[in-house]
Amino acid sequence: MIEIGLTILTFSAMLMIFKYFGIYNVNNLQAIVINYFTAGLLAIANAKFNGLDYHFDSIIYSDYLIPSLIIGTLFIITFNLVAFGTQKIGIAVTTVANKMSMIIPVLFGLILFNEDKNILKITGIILALFAIYFSSTNKGKLSFDKKYLLIIILIFIGQGFADGTLNWVQKYRIDSSNTQQFFATTFLIAGLAGLIFMLLEKIKKNQPFELKSIYWGIILGIPNYLTLYFFIKSLQAGILESSQVFPIINMGIIICSAVGGIILFKEQLSKSNWGGILLALIAISMITFSSIFY
């Protein structure tokens, strides 16, 4: 459970850093690319510190290479879709699509891994979806231009399958001997894919590279690495099933980021937002204790 708490804290820290990106007018894409390379280098350093090899042969013949390619590419594509969605559709709709995607890795756990399907857990998961909706919308209302429906669907699918594949990988492809190498490969692939997007941005908009993107990217890369590290630890701990871990972490992030927004940015929450947070607390309790009562 400590790993789940640390995952929530480090991911929430990333969201707070994104807020500062807006305040200081940081180029999102450039900082995100630097962030992925930073996280990848941290994983390599951790592997080397623990006496584990990380070289081309160990990657190319590894069991995790294909999943790393899939997850790393989905990471950067989904990020760009989220950035586009935030600008064109709005934060609320984009956030709901992104967080509702947790249902995909949850279904992975329930169906593919045959995890427990008791009524308390299922009810908690359903409440978690309502919690996401009400905590992310203004007065419980959600509207958008229907021409952007495909973007919303792609965000939902992209984030969901990235998490679902990550869940599958930690179960069947990685262990203590290669987890850091998997992290490094996934992050570096995301960074390299991001460079392609940066090149396209350069060609299309003649966007210059900004020096501040480097240090903001490094600042973001540290909690990004730690989030994945503690998240995989949470899944591997075996205390809770993956169909419990995903919604608990999502609900915890909602609560933690709301508190952080109030304290750091003086954000105001509507009654529906507070209702969503209350539902999140109830959902966490139901999902967590479902394994005790059933």
Image (cartoon, helix red, strand yellow):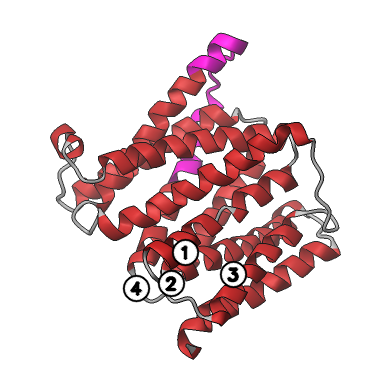
Q: Is residue 207 magenta?
A: yes
* Res. 79 image quadrant: top right
Q: 72 or 123: nearer the eye?
A: 123
Place of residue 280 in the rendered image (x, y in percent of width and height, measured from the top left): 66, 70
* Residue that numbered label 1 is attached to: 6
* Res. 71 image quadrant: top left
User: Which is closer to the viewer, label 3 or label 2?
Assistant: 3
Q: Earlier in the sequence, mark 3 or mark 2?
A: 2
Cα separation, mark 2 vs mark 1, equals 6 Å
Q: Amino acid at mark 2?
A: Ile
How crowded is the residue under tag 1: few (<14 C-alpha within 10 Å), some, or many (20+)? Answer: some
Q: Earlier in the sequence, mark 3 or mark 1?
A: 1
Which element is circle 1 on?
helix
Residue 17: mark in rendering: none
Q: Is label 4 in contact with label 3 (beta carbons under 8 Å)?
A: no
Cα separation, mark 4 vs mark 3, equals 19 Å
Which residue corresponds to the image point at 61% horizontal and 76% vertical from the top-left? Answer: 123
Can I make out residue 41 in this image? no
* Residue that numbered label 2 is attached to: 2
Q: Earlier in the sequence, mark 4 or mark 1?
A: 1
Cα separation, mark 4 vs mark 2, equals 13 Å
Place of residue 203 in the rendered image (x, y in percent of width and height, measured from the top left): 54, 9
Q: 34 or 66: nearer the eye?
A: 66
Up/down of 96 relative to 208, above or below: below
Q: Amino acid at mark 1?
A: Leu
Which element is circle 3 on?
helix
- The magenta-colored residue range is 199-222
Cα separation, mark 3 vs mark 1, equals 21 Å
* Residue that numbered label 4 is attached to: 238
Q: Is label 2 in contact with label 1 (beta carbons under 8 Å)?
A: yes
How crowded is the residue under tag 2: few (<14 C-alpha within 10 Å), some, or many (20+)? Answer: few
* Residue that numbered label 3 is attached to: 125
